[in-house]
Structure formats: C-alpha cells, structure tokens
Amino acid sequence: MNFERKQFPLLYVNQHSRGIVGWGASKVAGQECQRYGIRHALLVTTGLKGTGIIDEVEGVLKCAGIAVTVFAGVTSNPKCEEVAAGTRLYLEAGCDGVVSVGGGSSHDAGKAIRIMLTNQGAKTVLRDFMAVLEPHFTTRIPTYKAVQIPHVAINTTTGTGADCTSFAIINDEELKYKLILIVPGVDPSVGINDPAFMRCQPAHLLAWTGIDALCHAMEPFIGRLNLPVSHATSLRAIKLLSENLRQGYANPRNDAAIENLLWAQFLASMSYNMGGGMGMVHGLAHMVSVLKDLHHGYANALMLLPVERFNAIACPERFKEIGEAMGLDVRYLTPVQATDKTLDEIARLLRDVGIPPVSLQDFEFSEADIDHTARWASNDISLEANPRDMSLEQIKTIMRSCL
Ligand SMILES: [Fe+2]
C-alpha cells in the first residue's frame, strides 16, 4: 500500500450546534437553560423594541426558575466596548450563562462575552483572538482556553446562522476592522429557531438577512475548499431562498415563506460553518460595514455582484448549478453563458426585495477607505476560500467600481 499520497488543504468538517426548530420552539428556552446548568442568565440583545419578544423570553425563563439580567446594550455591528460592558454586568449580577435573543449581532456579542469571561474578564483584549491569514490563525488556536460557559441562542431573523456557528464577529473601532474570533467552544450550546419570532421582522430586515443567507450558501459552494457537505446544503438553501424571499419580503406574515426562509438560513449556515468557508463578498462587506456602520446583510447585498462578477471566471460551472437551483433554464447554455444569466437573476432578486444598486459614494466611501479596505481585506481569512485569487490592487479596483 502507498500511504504517501497527501492533499492540501485537508478538509475539516466541523460540528454544528444543537438546534431546535419549529413553531413554539422558544417555549423550551427555560428547559434548555436547565439542561446546561444555567440558573441566572445574562440575556444579551439589541432590544428588539416594539416586538414584545424580550418580555416573552424573560417570562419563559422565569417560569422555569431561571433568574434573568437583561443586557440590551448591543448594536448592529457589535463593538468591543459593548462586549466589555456586557461582561462587567455578567460578573456584577453573578450570572452563570448567556441567553442571546436576536439576530447575528446579539449572538456574536453573547459569544464574545463568553470569550472574555474565559480569559481576563472585562480586561480581555479581543484583538488577541482575531483570526487572520498572517500569522495564520490555525497556529494560534491551540494556545486558546476553550470556552465552557453555556449559551442558549434564540434567533429572531431568517438570515444569520450565528445561533449555531463557531465564530463571533466584533467591530474593533480603533482598528476599523471586524475581528473574526475563532475560539474552541465558542459555538452556542443550542440554537433555537422559532418562526413565531421571525414573523416580527420588518420587511427590509428580512430582505437584508435573506441576502446574507444567500451569500452564506453561495460562497462555500463556489469556494476553493470545495467541501461536498456544503454542496448539498448550499443548493437547497439557494433554492429555498430564490423561491421564498420575494414572498416573505412582500408579507413577513406569510408563514409558509417564513418557515422556508428559516430552513434556508439554517442550511446556509451549515454550509460555511461545517467547513465550506466564506469568500470575499463577506471579506469586503465586513470592511464596508465597519467603516460606514451599515447592516451586515445590506453590506453583503452591495458587494455580492461586484465580487461574484470578478470571481465568475474561476468557477462558471458552479454558477450554472446555482442558476439551476434558482429555477433558471440553463440546460443548453455554456457555463459562461449560464453564469451571466445567474448573475442577472441575482440582480433581479436584489431589486425585487428593495435593494437596488447604489454607489458607495452615497455613504461617503473615500479613496482612503479603499486603501484601508484593501490593506485589511488582503489579510482576511475570507480570502483563503475565495475561488479566485484577489490581489491588493484588484481589491482596490473592485471597490472603485462600487463608487
Ligand atoms: Fe453573513
């Protein structure tokens, strides 16, 4: 036998958090806290004002005998200072676990609070845990303490996936960079997806988070890590999104559309979290949202076509499959022709859900911002899985095309 054959990179198939899905799933949040030994929860949220969701979850937890301290100091694009404030409150109140309620911002803040508690409390410098290419993040992970603080994540959007994934993304306002924090054990103990909460999303948020989910499905599918597990989940997620996002946007109380979008976001999060990786739509969107405080999903929507038009020559056969999953008739087209059709269909979907093309100049994105974006994005781990090499100058060209 010849055991000398090797491949690079090796594919790592990661675990995904436990999930509970379905109407009324939020009612078991108290039981889930008991299961993981949480007696006093720090409820981490952006507030979700006007929905009644926080009062509802507090009631469910208290019914199960769980004490609750609410930390509603998280904003969209959660920041290091907010995480430090949540960590201080956790310690002052004597909490023993986290319950995050909301979209990706709340879950990521909850994960980052747990990283701080595992290290030097509120004095922890989150920057010390950021994953970049140079020095390569995998060389540092074995030196980190594993997070063991329990976390119940209750999702209220149909687009994040952060309720079940192994990363936290936090704004470092000083660096003007989104820290990607990959620490063992940071994935929540359980993610709860209840469509009853997702019906409360405003239409524009449903559209933004839905396009985020589309990127979560597409980027691993076309990416160079080429993980077969992701192929399956991505294609189903793309199909569900293209068949339901318009209807959900038109009427967020369309229960069938909400259920399908819930599963789309769940499948899409599996695609990247289980090892498919992310690409430079996310890499560049992170820079846009950290510089201009734009919503993560909206920033992805702005970067989706410019980046994928650049990437297309690396994998036209994959874009053809995406077109098929979106219901396009591409049977008699070459992969290159099918790619054009697929990208046109994505442009149509974006317009239909209220995201027409806009110039980054509308957000006062400057030449200095382009330089900053190129410098940081060229060391971003999203570059590793992107299907096409992207130099610093090419990043600048893509960003200038968005002005
Ligand atoms: Fe995302």
Image (spheres, grey):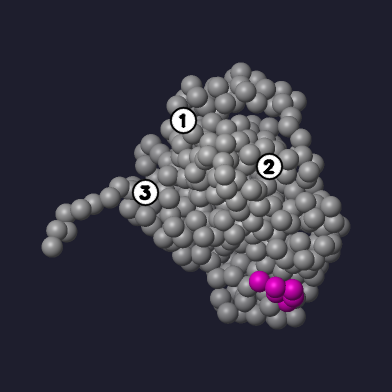
Name the secondary structure under disc 3: helix
Q: Residues within 10 Å of mark 1 (few under 14, many from 20)?
A: some
Answer yes or no: do the residues labelled 2 and 3 have beta carbons within 8 Å? no
Q: Which mark is residue 345?
A: 2
Left or right: 113 in relation to 313: right
Q: Which of marks 3 and 1 precedes in the sequence?
A: 3
- Answer above or below: position of 190 versus 400: below
Q: Which three-letter amino acid code belongs to the residue tagged 1?
A: Met
Nearer the observer, 13 or 63: 13
- N-terminal of the pair, mark 2 or mark 3, is 3
Residue matched to label 1? 390
The magenta segment:
21-27
Q: Identify the mark at residue 138; answer none if there is no mark.
A: 3
Label 1 – label 2 distance at C-alpha: 25 Å
Q: Name the residue located 82 percent from the left edge and 62 percent from the top edge.
A: 254
Q: Is mark 1 within 8 Å of ligand 1?
A: no
Q: Is residue 328 magenta?
A: no
Q: Secondary structure at mark 2?
A: helix
